[in-house]
Image (cartoon, rainbow, N blue to C red):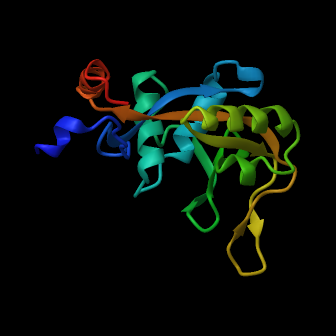
């Protein structure tokens, strides 16, 4: 404890120290950065309606509920492919089409109109935000050679889900104290 009086630099891992470890939905952006409309919010409701949602799906679902979007089962009407960390995406039918949600570099790769959204995803990720890509196709998911689901052909870039880590309520005050003490 006595040695801490001479500390001039403090390095922290953010998860659990500055943040609570939970994520929350910041916003959903359509192509061009426009706010997502009802169709995209309905697709997200279908995509997050799996029985055992992961942390990302839970954050999106809770954020949608706060916006008054349809509940998780309100708009699902077709094929469902649960999220897989190996594949890095999930899919669900909604509005007569197949919607895909996952790592932007995977789901937007080769999708029509993806260039600007991929650049935006990199920009947001560079600011410390978690970004998930959305694509839509008229076709169902196919099968990969290993028997797993394959991304549907003819995907079009549909938007980005922007998530942020939940900051601990006392983090700002604590970090301000360190700054006031001359600690970097």
Q: Position of residue 10 (x, y in %)?
A: 33, 39
Total numbered labels placed on residues in the image:
0
Question: In terms of image quadrants, where is residue 83?
Answer: bottom right
Question: Can residue 38 be seen in the rendering of this structure?
Answer: yes
The residue under the point 11% across, 45% down is 1
Foreground: 57 or 98?
57
Residue 99 in sight here: no
Q: Which of these two is toward me, 164 or 57? A: 164
Which residue is at 32% across, 22% downward? 179
Q: In this view, does 177 lie above or below 152?
A: above
**Residue under the image location 85 percent in, 56 percent down:** 153
Residue 142 on image: x %, y %: 77, 66
In the picture, measured across the screen, residue 156 lies left or right of residue 77, that is: right
Give the quadrant of residue 79. Answer: bottom right
Quarter of the figure with the C terminus: top left
In this view, the residue in front, 40 or 75, is: 40
The image position of residue 97, as x and y in percent, is 74, 44
Q: Residue furthest bottom?
A: 146
Q: Position of residue 2 (x, y in %)?
A: 11, 43
Q: What residue is shown at x 31% (from left), y 23% (from top)?
A: 182
Q: Along the horizontal axis of the image, is 50 left or right of 151?
A: left
């Amino acid at each position: 404890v006595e040695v801490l009086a001479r500390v001039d630099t403090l390095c922290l891992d953010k998860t659990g120290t500055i943040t609570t470890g939970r994520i929350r939905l910041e916003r959903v952006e359509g192509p061009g950065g426009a706010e997502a409309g009802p169709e995209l919010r309905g697709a997200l409701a279908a995509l997050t309606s799996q029985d055992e949602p992961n942390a990302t799906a839970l954050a999106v679902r809770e954020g949608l509920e706060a916006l008054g979007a349809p509940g998780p089962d309100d708009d699902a009407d077709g094929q469902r492919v649960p999220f897989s960390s190996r594949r890095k995406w999930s899919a669900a039918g909604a509005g007569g089409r197949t919607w895909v949600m996952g790592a932007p570099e995977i789901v937007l790769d080769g999708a029509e109109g993806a260039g600007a959204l991929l650049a935006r995803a990199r920009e947001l990720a560079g600011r410390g935000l978690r970004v998930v890509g959305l694509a839509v196709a008229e076709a169902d998911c196919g099968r990969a050679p290993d028997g797993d689901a394959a991304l549907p052909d003819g995907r079009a870039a549909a938007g980005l889900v922007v998530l942020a880590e939940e900051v601990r309520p006392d983090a700002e005050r604590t970090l301000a104290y360190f700054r006031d003490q001359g600690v970097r």
